[in-house]
Amino acid sequence: MQIECPRCNNPVTVRDRDAGTTYRCGMCGRSFVVPADIARKGRPHQLSTFPVASLVLLHYITAGMFSVIYLNLLHDKMPQLRRSDPSATVAVGLSFVPGLNLIWFFFTYYRLCVRINEQRRFNGLPETAPTTLSAAVALLTLGGALAYVFPAPGLVVLGVLVLIVMPIFAGMVQNSINGLVEGPAVPAVSI
Ligand SMILES: [Zn+2]
């Protein structure tokens, strides 16, 4: 987006991820700090509401596959505020690379929660996306991979993940998004 250089008042083009960093103006050559809130003003998120019950149902019908794809696609619905914020293509792609995905899940779900919470904060809402639970999801996925070597304990861990923890995680993420899109509840005014 374009902002005005506070030194020479010429228009300069900055990216969302330049927010809060020092930027050197190409016109006057002097440096200034890009306002931290340009990302919010520059490009709003494109997250949309989705019924939590439908999400959980689709999760069970597809044995968890829907959640993995759906959650990773959400990365494209928010402005990229850091160089390491992944695109949906990268996020979904790495989720299906055997072995590598076990490490990827630790990053992608955590960052997803951080990005949603950032958007909630920009809108004056409490941070409700489950960052802590994202680590549990990744740990259980790693544990579930044990099923290749130790079928019995591995399948138990996988069961806990797919039947309990993952649907709760996906539901909490969607709940945070629904609250963000719908905005804070406005008390009814009686006349
Ligand atoms: Zn300037």
Image: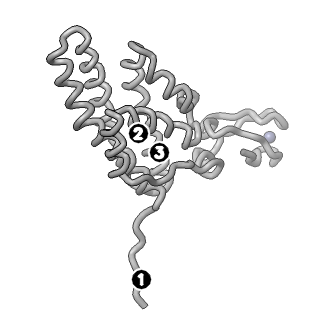
Tell me if residue 52 comes above or below residue 98 in the rendering: below
Mark closest to the chain's N terminus, 3 or 2: 2
Mark closest to the chain's N terminus, 2 or 1: 2
Badge 3 density bin: few <14, some 14–19, many ≥20, Cα 10 Å: some
Q: Which mark is residue 189?
A: 1
Amino acid carrying label 2: it is Cys
Respond yes or no on whether mark 1 lies under 8 Å from ligand 1.
no
- Which numbered disc, 1 or 3, marks the residue closer to the eye? 1
Q: How many marks?
A: 3
Q: Position of residue 136 (x, y in %)?
A: 27, 30
Secondary structure of residue under mark 2 = helix
Q: Which mark is residue 118?
A: 3
Q: Are marks 3 and 2 in contact (CB under 8 Å)?
A: no
Task: Confirm whether residue 6 shows in the render.
Answer: no
Q: Position of residue 60 (x, y in %)?
A: 30, 39
Q: Quadrant of the C terminus?
A: bottom left
Task: Confirm whether residue 27 shows in the render.
Answer: yes
Query: Image quadrant of ligand 1?
Result: top right
179 and 157: which one is in front? Answer: 157
Secondary structure of residue under mark 3 = helix
Tell me if residue 51 comes above or below residue 161 in the rendering: below
Respond yes or no on whether mark 3 lies under 8 Å from ligand 1.
no
Q: Residue at x 49, y 48 (%)?
A: 119
Q: Residue at x 58, y 37 (%)?
A: 80
Task: Determine which quarter of the picture holds residue 100.
Answer: top left
Q: Residue at x 59, y 50 (%)?
A: 44
Image check: 152 left or right of 182?
left
Amino acid carrying label 1: it is Val
Image check: 77 left or right of 145?
right
190 and 25: which one is in front? Answer: 190
Q: Which residue is mark 2?
A: 113
